[in-house]
Amino acid sequence: MAGVNETASLAGAEAAISRDAGRRLDAVFRSGAGIFSILVLLIAWETFARSGKVTPFMLPPFSAVAERIYADAIAGDLWRNLAVTLFRALTGFAIAAVGGVALGAMMARSRIVRWFFDPIISVGFPMPKIAFLPIIILWLGLYDVSKISVVVFDAIFPVVTATLAGLAGVERELIWSGRNMGANERELMWQIALPAALPQILTGLQVALPIALIVAIIAEMAMGGYGLGGAMMSASRFADSRGVFAGIVEIAIVGYALIKAMALVRHRLLAWHHETVEDR
Amino acid sequence: MRGKVTSAGMAALGLILGLAVGSLNSGAQAEPLKIRGAWVAPISNFASIWLQKKDLAVHFGHSYVFESVRYAGTPPMITAIANNEVEIGNLAFSTLPIAIGNAGMDDIRVISDDFQDGVTGYVSNDYEVLADGPIKKVEDLKGKVIAINAAGAGVDVAMRAMLRKHGLEANRDYTIIEAPFPGMKSMLMEKKVDLIPGVLPFMLDPELKKNARTLFDMKAAIGRSQFVMWSSRKPFIDAHRAVLVDFLEDSLRILYWYLDPKNHDAVAEIASQITKQPPERFGWVFTKNDYYRDPNLMPDLDALQKNVDMTHELGFVKASFDVKAHSDLSLIQEAAKRLK
């Protein structure tokens, strides 16, 4: 009997080790695949740019672009432009996040608020908000306020709709249970509804964050001054293709880092949620 | 016998192929060459008013057809030239070295004048601030916003040169934004920007003249300049030399008409139609109140050399170059000879 138990526990341990090894192998493969495809892309870029089929003006080699990024980093231009762009994108994102969640929550709670804002959201969401840039410049000028405003204007819509959908989808039983246990409306919202809607709200924020970065860069390209977008536009005007491609690579890296950071935040905030538990 | 049949067959095949290639070639020659010419400012840039007098162009529709294409500034033309999307660029003194030095288009050749700035007795571009605003001298621009049509354009480089003389550097001391020329007046009057370049015809806007004043002009900033000129790529010139001479011959014919004082009212009418402004506002066109335009479309290469050297000294290009080696004036000279 003891032998049977030992065999069973050994088999269980082997299976667990095997599962663990499988998971690790899978993780290594997945991260390796990501690096591999990027490497292939960079090698193809370098090879094609050096093939003589295109001029360095049309496509500079990746090595030359990397050299340019290094030179900009040493000179401090990269950090200054990066800081300015991130400041604009993240400030706009933060305002859109707070404002979007607040408006979404108000729309979920109040019929009048929903009646008023629903058509505006429906009409405004699919509109290309960047088209308002000339008006925003006219009203708010050319400095940070106008650039941040256009970021907020663009990024707030996915947050509002995600919050609204998240709160609308909270299970009735949770609300009823809270009410039965004596929770008031405020406690219901803060302690039950918002945490329950958090996965969907975070999805909205994850959509809004890259939008904030993209819009900040487009606004900088249109309005000039410091920032990654302004530097790219300036490089383009002076036929400095290495500068333009350096900007593209920098934006790709920043965008990737922001998306990863946001995913990490989601993971932490939803530590209790089944999506995170299943991931472990 | 078999050999004779094969030879006859080959000869027949050769004849058919020859006829086919010949008919293709004659077809290609019959098709007029499409020449796209770039411009930025209406009226001021010759390409913008060229088609209004195409009735004078005897070769138009025969050896070539001309299409004028508007750009926001001369820098975007560099990309268009690189992509063969425009055959005749209207490059400024600043964008020519950028195209050659930075974009690596060593085969660009200056082929004719468009207009020159800073010529005594003619108009020079100016830089304007609000008449009742706080900017009284160049140094007051520290921390301010300056509008230009496109970074790297002639008005931008001349403005940077002037501000540098007064110890001010772009980005460090002032912010540059891009705006289209027609919108600059409103931006200045709404106090969204502190300095705008004044180019013809926009600098003559009555409301602007009432509310703004000149802080400095381009002549004070950089002296005489070969402000903009027509330029084309050497492979295109080599492939279509005869057609380009036809085009330039027609261009001279049209320019002579525009410069003729007896056509002045008709010229003002054309300018009015293009800009949708009253013709009375165009008394300046092709007079001494306009930019200097060489009557034979000959660019001032000495002025251009100084401008290119200055663009290099300002740090926009790594090295200067001999502008004569990047010019081909034989086309315009040949075209002028035909009209004598």
Image: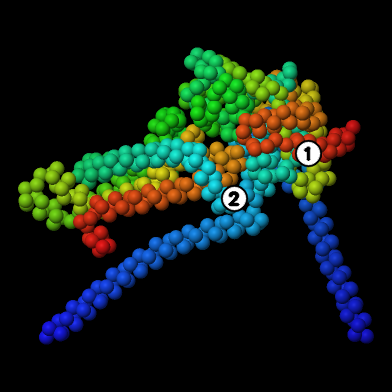
Using the image, determine if residue B269 lies above or below residue A180. Answer: above
Asked whether the residues under the numbered discs 2 and 1 touch, taking CB atoms below 8 Å apart as contact, a structural biologist would say no
Secondary structure under the numbered disc 2 in the rendered image = loop
Residue B13 screen position, x and y as percent: 85, 73
* Quarter of the figure that contains the C terminus of chain B: top right
Residue at the spot 73% in from the left edge and 30% down from the top edge: B304
The residue tagged 2 is A60
Same subunit: marks 2 and 1: no
Residue B292 appears in the picture as rendered:
yes
Residue A176 screen position, x and y as percent: 11, 53
* Quarter of the figure that contains the N terminus of chain B: bottom right
Q: Quadrant of residue B113?
A: top right
Answer left or right for B4 relative to A37.
Answer: right
The residue tagged 1 is B325
Residue at the spot 26% in from the left edge and 48% down from the top edge: A164
Residue A177 screen position, x and y as percent: 10, 54
How far apart marks 2 and 1 lie (CA) works out to: 27 Å
Residue at the spot 83% in from the left edge and 68% down from the top edge: B17
Chain letter for the residue marked with disc 2 in the picture: A
Within 10 angstroms of label 1, few (less than 14), some, or many (20 or more) residues? few
> The disc labelled 2 sits on which kind of residue?
Pro
Answer left or right for B142 relative to B330.
Answer: left
Q: Depth check: give the residue in front, B222 or B113.
A: B222
Using the image, determine if residue A81 lies above or below residue A48. Answer: above
Chain letter for the residue marked with disc 1 in the picture: B
> The disc labelled 1 sits on which kind of residue?
Ala
